[in-house]
Amino acid sequence: MGRRFRKRGGAPIKESTTPETEQNNKIVLFPKTLDYYQIQLTVMLENERYGEAMDLLRFLLQCQGQEERHYDEWRALLEWLQAAFPQYEESEMQTIREEEEEDISEEEMARQHAKSKLAQDDGYADKLLGTVMEGPLSEQTMLALEQLAFLDVPKVDEELIRWLQTKVLHPLLQFRVMQTLRRRGVQDIIHFTRGDEEVEVDIANVPLKPEEFPLQIVQILERVADQTEVHEPTLFYFAQELWIQYVMAVYGTRDYQSMLEQNDDMADIWAAALHMTVADSLGGSHDEENTRSMYAVTGAMRFRLEQAYRSMKQFVSAGLDGH
């Protein structure tokens, strides 16, 4: 599982402190990013925000590529905080347990609600399918898909797959349908059209949460973070929002597959395209030469950058129009 998409400027998310995540998520911090977190840590300690400071220290200890003295300092400070302020540690663990219990409870409640509705109305699944397939794209569409995920009605799988394969749908709606199929336990590989290409998607691998996307997807966003999060925080905030929407929209396509290449050049290309697209949205234009230099995109890579940039611009321009 890849590292979580996370908002910058605050404490790392709680789930990143588990042993399993420590093992799987080895993150490399760039120098400017490390300086930023060191400043954050100082501010937290000065303001007696000890619980957040412990979170941040755990996160930093997961990172790789730093000087050993940094790890020694972070480890010693964390141990001192844990000993001096155990109440923050206990409060943190209690909060994590409560959130996990709440997540389980909400899913079980949704399952019981769908089961109850189906018991009261044999046609409930058909009504939900009608809302999804025949109504305008809206919040009701998404709510109906969520409820369909919990209905034990086999024909729902068939109807949703047929809909994917025969109708022209907005790519984000396609992705939500794929997520619903995965939640329903579908294991099939499905062939259908996304944009102007035929794709093959293994439903069992469709991410249900942003943090389930491969690490390469997160690393592209990290490149933008290194260039923007301190000096252009507004650009980085919108980059996070756009990036997760875009990768859902192109999931399974050639563009998406290119992001997964174990190739630094390709990661730089996508990071530069994301930076340019967000800069356009915020200020109406961008300095392409400066951005290419910032991400080390050479002349030989320029054509691929233009393709990635054009793809992202088309996604932004399309918005959510149409069903």
Image (spheres, rainbow, N blue to C red):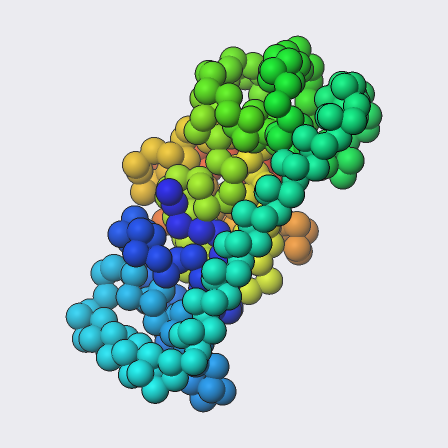
Left or right for 302, reference 75: right
- Give the answer, above or below, for where 158 lies relative to 34: above
Please state, as top left, top right, bottom left or bottom right, where the N terminus lies in the image.
top left
Quadrant in the picture for the C terminus: top right
The picture quadrant where one finds residue 262 is top left
Query: Which residue is most to the left?
Result: 68
In the image, taking residue 146 as reference, residue 323 lies left or right, namely right
96 vs 209, nearest the viewer: 96
Whether residue 173 is visible, yes or no, is: no
Residue in the picture at 38% in, 80% down: 86
Residue 91 horizontal/vertical position (percent)? 47, 73
Residue 121 in view here: yes
Residue at 73 percent of width and 26 percent of height: 118
The residue at the point 50 percent across, 25 percent down is 185
Counting from the top left corner in percent of width and height, residue 95 is at: 50, 66
Near-viewer residue (244 or 154): 154
Residue situated in front as seen by the camera: 256 or 174: 174
Name the spot of residue 93 as percent of width and height, x first: 43, 67
- Count of numbered labels shown in the rendering: 0
Q: Which of the 4 image quadrants contains residue 28?
A: bottom left
Q: Position of residue 156 (x, y in %)?
A: 65, 18
Rendered position, 108 above or below 311:
below
> Against 84, is 210 above or below?
above
